[in-house]
Image (cartoon, rainbow, N blue to C red):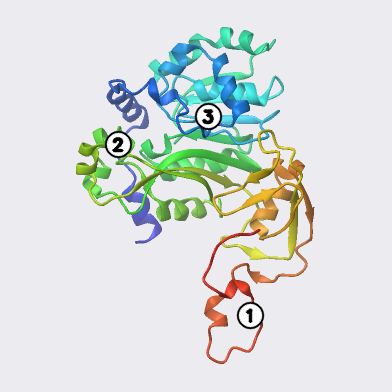
Amino acid sequence: MDYQGYRDWYTLDVDPEEYYREIAKLQDADPQATARTRDTDETIPPSIREKLFNISAEIKNYFHEFGTPMPPLLEGCTVLDLCCGSGRDTYLAAQLVGPTGKVIGIEPDAERLVKAEKYLDQEMAQFGYDAFNVDFIHGAPEDLSMIADESIDVVISNCTFNLSPNKNAYVEEVKRVLKEGGEWYFTDVFTDRRIPLEKARDIKLRALRLAGAMYINDFRRLVQHFELLDPRYLMTFKTELTASEQGLFPDIAFATITVRAMKSKWAEDVCESYGETVTYKGNLPDYPDAFLFDTNIKFPTGKTCPVCGNVSAIAAHSRYSSAFEYTGNRDQHIGDTHGDHIIKTAPNYEGVYDEDDQPINASCC
């Protein structure tokens, strides 16, 4: 299936505002709305979790998502929260960016937006801010024309990308508004295969946050098409289904994954080696001993680690640079980090083999 084909697989011919309004109506009947504000898996770092207590109970009780996708080092950043709902994550981010930062919450459903805006004065006072650092906008992620090009440091979204009726437009807009070195950091539901087409286009099943979930390799192809070349997966949890949901989606595995996708001119579509190293300083809040970069890479504090060019791009050319010491340059290209198996398995190959010519156990460190 070519790019156009799998893009169309996930795209609905609908008006986004009407679509999201219908989704909101279908979800309002969900009795788990309040429970989903709880951090039952303790995936939220302690310093962030404690800030939830500063947010109004009504905001939290009308918020529909689990956990919260918040990367470190947000102070002073401009953050965009897509499909912010009642604003819980927006107000959480507002505390993390501090009074010198800014958070913009985009919400397509007017009723949910009213709940978010209702507490704006109260929340700013609770945070001790003299001026607003939060702005709520009625709009949809598929059209962020109200946001300037390359004006956002970090885009967050919390289990709402799967709802998008046009994921192509969603990702294209994320890429457009992100600054060079910016990050899309989000949690969402993905699958091990494509949802059957008739179910993928059923709005009632989409409202369950299941029918609109992307096949994980289609997601990789989509973001790479828009030059977010090396998406990284941090935490993966099995998405538990009810018996009725299992009946609707037999043989399909669902997983809730936290994703980091960076916009970087230094990135490549595979891990290439240039002999670079990074050393984590241990100065990120909540990560004094080690920093989890993705499911395969954990940087221990003070240990110098060889890394691929994509990791060094983030460590040296993004806001994360303050957390790492970097050595190296791009003067010499050493090739695929994990070895070029096509070339090196030729019968008459007489070049250099290395440890990565064995079955891949992907890690840059």
Element on which disc 3 rests: strand
The residue tagged 1 is 353
Element on which disc 1 rests: loop
**Quadrant (top left, top right, bottom left, bottom right) of the C terminus:** bottom right
Q: Residue 339, can we see it?
A: no
The type of residue carrying mark 2 is Arg
The reply to whether discs 2 and 3 touch (Cβ–Cβ < 8 Å) is: no
User: Residue 146: image x %, image y %?
Assistant: 54, 28
Closest to the observer, 300 or 346: 300
Q: How many marks?
A: 3
User: Residue 97: image x %, image y %?
Assistant: 66, 26
Question: Which numbered circle lies on residue 81?
Answer: 3
The type of residue carrying mark 1 is Tyr
The residue tagged 2 is 206
Q: Is residue 100 left or right of residue 161?
A: right
* Residue 50 sits in quarter: top right
Closest to the observer, 293 or 98: 293
Q: Is residue 229 left or right of residue 17?
A: right
- Of the residues under marks 1 and 3, which one precedes in the sequence? 3
The type of residue carrying mark 3 is Asp
User: Residue 207: image x %, image y %?
Assistant: 30, 32
Residue under the image location 31 percent in, 20 percent down: 28
Q: Is residue 57 left or right of residue 121?
A: left
- Give the CA separation, mark 1 to mark 3: 46 Å
- Of the residues under marks 2 and 3, which one precedes in the sequence? 3
Q: Residue 301, can we see it?
A: yes
- Crowd class of label 3 (few under 14; some 14 to 19; many from 20; radius 10 Å): many
